[in-house]
Image (spheres, rainbow, N blue to C red):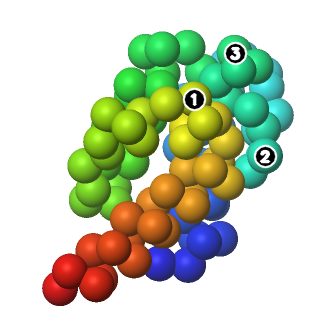
Amino acid sequence: MERTVIEQTILSYLRLHIQDKGIAVDIDTSLISSGVLDSLAVFDLVGYIEQTYRIQLTADEMNAECLDTVTNLSNLIQSRDRAGSRES
């Protein structure tokens, strides 16, 4: 799956869910460490990603480093997509 498509999909989700906060979000915005997303919002985002991309994130992947930016999320999804392609 193309990186820009993943990034735009995640950005659309985020913008829809944080629009009432008046925060501008781009692919490099720190989502967790800057407080854009609280723990419940992170949980919802993980659920969205797992459902949308049909992947199951591991406990090791559910950390601030992997989930803090749209770029990091896109990299994670792409790496899982590539790993899934090799297993097929």
- Looking at marks 1 and 2 on the same chain, the residue that comes earlier in the sequence is marked by 2
Q: Give the image quarter of residue 9.
A: bottom right
Residue 32 visible from this viewpoint:
yes
Q: Which residue is mark 3?
A: 35
Q: Give the image quarter of residue 34.
A: top right
Image coordinates of residue 15 in percent, x first then y, are 64, 38
Amino acid type indicated by mark 2: Asp
Image coordinates of residue 47 in percent, x first then y, are 32, 37
- Looking at marks 2 and 3 on the same chain, the residue that comes earlier in the sequence is marked by 2
Image coordinates of residue 21 in percent, x first then y, are 72, 17
Callout 2: SS: loop
* Residue 42 located left or right of residue 51: right
The CA distance from mark 2 to mark 3 is 14 Å
Q: Which residue is mark 2?
A: 28
Residue 51 visible from this viewpoint:
no
Q: Nearer the viewer, residue 85 or 23?
A: 85
Amino acid type indicated by mark 1: Ala
Callout 3: SS: loop
> Of all residues shown, which one is farthest toward the left?
88
Q: Which residue is mark 1?
A: 64
Q: Residue at x 28, y 84 (%)?
A: 86
- Tell me if mark 1 has few (under 14), some (14-19) or many (20+) residues whose alpha carbon lies within 10 angstroms of its own: some
Task: From the image, state whether disc 1 or disc 3 is nearer to you.
Answer: 1
